[in-house]
Every structure is written in C-alpha cells, then in structure tokens.
Image: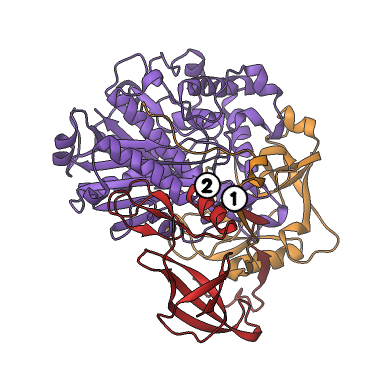
Chain colours: A purple, B red, C orange
Amino acid sequence: MRTNLYFRRVAVIGAGLTLFKRRLLETPQELAWEASKKALDEAGLELKDIDCVVIGSAPDAFDGVHMKGEYLSHGSGGIRKMSSRVFVGGATGVMVPITAWYHVASGLCEKVLAVAEEKMSPARPHPQSVFRYIWDPIIEKPLNPNLIWIFAMEMHRYMHVNKITKEEIALVSVKNKKNALDNPYAQAAANITVDDVLKSEVLVWPVQLLDTSPVSDGAAAMVITSEDVARRYTDTPVWIEGVGWTLDNTEWTGRELAYPRYLEHAALMAYKMAGIERPNKEIDVIEPYDPFDYKELHHIEGLKIAKRGEATKLLKEGVFDKDGDIPSSPSGGLLGVGNPIAAAGLMKTISIYWQLKGTAGRMQVKKPVRTGLAQAWGDLMQASTVIVMRN
Amino acid sequence: MSWDKVGREDSLLTWKDVMQAEEYVYTVGVAGEEFFNGLKQKKIIGSKCPKCGKVYVPARLYCEDCFVKNDFVEVNEKPYIDSFTVIYKDEEGNKLEKPQTVALIRFGNTKGGILAYVSEGEVDIGRGVEILEYKIPLIVRVK
Amino acid sequence: MSETPSGTPLKEEDLKKVNTVVYKPKAEYAYSAGQAQSKFLLGLKEKKIIGRKCNKCGRVYVPPRMYCDDCFRPTDEWVEVKDEGIVETVVASFISWTRERMEKPEIVGVIRLFPSSDRDWVFPGLFHRICADFEDVKNMSLFGKKVKAVWRENRVGSIDDIECFEVVK
C-alpha cells in the first residue's frame, strides 16, 4: 500500500492488559508493572533491553498522588532510563503509542515500552467530584456543574441537529456491551436491550445510566520497536502507519457542538500519512472512543467514515456489527470494558493490534483485516488522537 | 495584551476557592498488605528478587532492575541510622513545642529504608537503633 | 491473549478488611481574574454582559478574551452584547457534583447571545441555568427559543448574579 511515510518503519510486537474493575487492590505502580510485564513477555524482551519508556496518565487528582509520571516510572521500568510522560486528558490513551512512535521513528530509540495506567477509586466521595476542577473557576464553577452536564449538552444538540432519537443511540450501548461478553478483561459486559437502556436511572437528561461507561481502575502496556528489531523477534509485527492529533480551543460555549471539527483535522493528518483516500472503503476495523453511546456515532462522523448525520442510518443497517462491513468496537469499547481514563485509549489500540495479529480469540471479527484504526478523545471535549495500523 | 487607555481596570479581582476532593482512600497494594500486616506482628517484611538476590524494604511486589516477581521474606538485619535531621516547625509553619529528630533507618545490606522519629539517644550517622513502636513512621531509640 | 487477566478486584465492603491510608488534601487558591474577566464580572454587577471584539475577523468573545484565538493578535475593543439570546442546547440534571441524587432537576444549557446569527460556527455564548420545566427539556421544544436573563436584586459581581434565562416571546 502506498504510504507517505518519510520516517523509519515502526512496529508493535507485544501488548498487555490488567483486569478493568471498579476497585482494585494494587497500587498504581503494581498495576503498571503487571501490564508492562505481560507486554514484555509477549514481545520476548527483558527490561534491560528497553531503552526508552513513555508513560501516560490522566489527572493526578484521581490517584491522589501528585507528579504521577515520576511515581509511575518505578512500575513501568523507567528507573535509570529515558522516560517521559504525556497527558491530553482522555486522549492520552492513544497519545501514548503516538509518542512512542515518534521516539522510534526519529531514530532516537530502538525499543520503547509504552504504559498507560489509571486508578480512579481513591477519590471520595466519588471520582466525578474531582472533575469539578476542570471548569473555569470564575465563570463556570459557581454554578456547581457535574461533568456529565457537558456530555448531555453535546448529546442533546447532536440529537436536535441530526434528528435522531434516543432509541437509535441506545443501539450502540447494546452492541458494545454484547461484544464485551467475549472479552475476559471486561467489567461491564451484559446482554441488554434498548428498553433496559431507556428504563435506567436518568442522570442528566438525555444521558441515562446505561448510556455511560463505568468508573474503573486498570493499566495497559505496549512494546514498540523499529523494523529491524521487530523482524528479529516476531513473524507478525503490526506496523504503525498513520498518526494524527489535534486540540481545539477550550471555549466550548462558543462553538458548534454537534460536529467534532478537531477530530476531522486529526483524522486527515493520519490518513495522509497512511495513504488512505476513502476511509469508509479502505479501513477494515475501527475502535472509536465511546465513553457514552452517542460519542461513537459522533466520532464515526468526525472520522469521515459516515457522512454528517448518517452514522445512525448505517448503524441500523448493521454495518458496524462484529460481522458487518466495518466492525466497530469489537472489544466492547469503554461501554463494555470500563473507563480508566488514560488506559482506555491504549486498551482500544491493543484491541486493534490483536485483531490485526489474529490473536483476538473470541473477539476476532469474521472478515480478513488489513487496516485498523483506534481513536481517543478527551480533555474539555477538544482533544483528539488517531492511530492507523496495518499488518 | 492591549493597553487601551480607556478600560484599563484599576480594580482587578481575585476569586477565592479550593481545589480539593473531600478525601482520598488509598489501598496499600499487594506488597503493602504483607508489609502492614507484618508491622501489626512487630516484624519488618521485605521482599527478595529470585534473580539478582536484592532485598527490598519495605516489601515491593517486583524487582526494579530484573522486573520479575519478588518473594516475601522477614528482615532480621540490624537497623542503623543512614541520615537524620532536626525539625523545628510543623507543616503549616507553626513552631513545635519540642524540636523533633527525624532519621532515615536502613536495615543491614538491604535496599531501601523507612523514616522514623527518634525518641531518645544521641543521634549520629551509623549508630544502631532499637525499634520501640512498629507503625509509620517508626519510633526508635538510639542504642 | 490466552493468559488469565491479572488484578485483584475489591468490593466496597472489602475496603474495611484491607489496610488503607486515608488523607484529606488541603489546597486553597485565590485565582486572579485578570483584565478581561474582571471587567466582565464588574459589568455583571451593572446588569451588562461585556464582551471583547477582534476587528480583523469580527469575532466577539463572551466571556471576553484579551487575544483572538484565530488571528493570534490582541483583541481591539470592549463591546456590550444583549442579555438575550437563543437556546443552543439544554439538559436537565438529576445529580449534584458529588453524584448525589436531586429530586428537582437543575436545568442548564448553552445560550447564544445576540448579536449573532444561527449560521455562525463560533459565537458569543454563556453556559447558565434556564428557567423551564423538565417536560420542556424532554420534548426538545426549548431548542431555538429566545430567552432573556433574569437578574438578581443584589448583585456582587459574579456569574451567579444572573438567576437564570427565561423564555420570552
């Protein structure tokens, strides 16, 4: 496939995940170690072979430990190595492999360990209360907002502009939770119906409890290397061929909420690098970020896989099912597996890695796959990262 | 920034608020469980790497160089003072009633150490100590 | 992918059985409002909504900013926008910021203030409460309605000086 890559080729040769659950006993360092060890074992490498470490973790305020990058580097093998921390809110999960990519593509490092970890259970009374501090302290905080208010506002506007009903959006939640039943790492897998979603607790109308992904603890890790190293250690490396990321301004009250224009920029950046001209024909499997069910549709439109306002039509035709034309979230996504803020994006990238390598077990999609895409989104609804991989 | 003569604000405002969650409940982790349960039984629990043999105190789940899982062991080495300091004010800047001596205690040949308050005795680097109370921080007495 | 996942899950009750360390952080802040927001807050005290305009691209910023995002140059003049606007989006919240359940929902939304048109992608807008019932939110009839600010009697120079925005004909 013709690509526009002017850098060294970079491949993924190992990945590891811990269980995603609401509350885990391990400390953040122990979680990071569990995931890193699995990734290294799959790659066939030892810690002393790794030259650089990239760590991704979302706000320190969740774990309750300040300067989390330094704290986590102990559990990620970052002691006495070149290590760096990246943070773009929820988009961190895909920013971590992108950062590891440019460490290798530039020629600086040969073998990089990329780790993402999040432990949301220490914060009391509820992790959502920590989100109180992302708002502008003078203009917005006095109204005592809850994080879910922003998502509800975006969802309601999306429904109004594109004339979509809640029943249609709930189909995404049903699909993802069902896909998660095949995923041994999942926290919230279930067999539900559209009725269950519509009858669940109303949090902030129109968002209801089964439209959201659960709060979790978890960690994920990947081993990313240059082409020479990859060919020595494995017969089936998965190549990273396109990356892109964009941030928009944080003034969300002054912007059209029904379409993520920043995601379009990021996606075009990644497609140009990977040589993709018609995304809906050239990509075989996708993992768009789905902390809420409408978000998957919102992002599918931003990724140009469906035209504006048409994602729901394709969803109802079954295009995004596991055995459809463009399977979406075969791992169960955040709705099914759990949402530890930074580790979730890396979990999605690992799911695409398993699909392209053929080792996804029961989650493997039916059609043969060549190109896969993972996407993460976050911050104050304005950052998005995209990664395209091929086998 | 523009400094137009009309509109330069003489009364700039400040807004007071806090940035804190109500409280945090930290779990001590798998290795921490062994260590804290050991403290309750008046023992110091460390962990030993099966590959390189280094012993870590307090116990750690994995070896930081070999990255393999450690085995938990009881540490019986003699504790000694590696370094110390004397503090006169508490964390908010108020003067303490009595200056407090804080020491870093290491155990024989192991890697790592635990902070302790020294209750009595002449402190000096290298002196051995006796542990009076097994809690965090330890309370010790110089021998 | 064939090994068993690692990690030790706990239930809320299990937290009492394991060792834990509890801590309450202390972090108090005095945020300085800066030039733009100070003038904005003082304007609210006088029942005015102040914005800032960039003359190169014509964009009006509410809340005001001293620099233009797109042109990357300082903005040029203070402008007053009307305290009326159109409802862009609205939601009804049944949970407080601590995730506690509320009986009566809090109705909030984004209001696009005049002067602006509905073809604008970016506009002067405010995030605030809207005086309405849950039913109006549910049947989506509030979208596109014209609303006006209801000011409090005692204003101190804070975003709370506006009680809410109510629908006008």
Residue in view at x 28 percent, y 58 percent: A82
In-image side of C42 versus C77 (left or right): right
Nearer-the-camera pick, A190 or B47: B47
Identity, as a three-letter code, of the amino acid under mark 1? Pro
> As shown in the figure, which amino acid type bears the numbered disc 2?
Lys
Is residue A66 shown left or right of residue C49? left
Relative placement, left or right, of C154 versus A247 is right
Disc 1 marks which residue? A122
User: Can see residue A245?
Assistant: no
- Measured as percent of width and height from the top left, residue B4 is found at 54, 74
Above or below, comparing residue B54 to residue C85 in the picture: below
| Quarter of the image where one finds residue A213 | top right
In the image shown, does A233 or B50 lie closer to the viewer? B50
Percent position of residue B106, x then y:
42, 70
* Residues behind callouts 1 and 2 on a single chain: yes
- Residue in the picture at 57% in, 21% down: A190
Query: Can the viewer see residue C138 in this picture?
Result: yes
Q: Secondary structure at mark 2?
A: strand
On the image, the x and y values in percent for residue B114 come to 48, 67
Label placed on residue C64: none
Is C151 located above or below residue A360 in the figure? Answer: below
Q: Secondary structure at mark 1?
A: loop
Around disc 1, counting alpha carbons within 10 Å, would you say few (fewer than 14), some (14 to 19), or many (20 or more)? many
Numbered disc total: 2
In front: B20, or B134? B134
Subunit bearing disc 1: A
Of the numbered discs in the image, which one, if any, rests on residue A119? 2
Residue at the image point whose x is 52% and y is 73% from the top? B130
Are circles 1 and 2 on residues that touch, CB within 8 Å? yes
Question: Could you tell me residue A53's position as x and y percent?
Answer: 31, 52
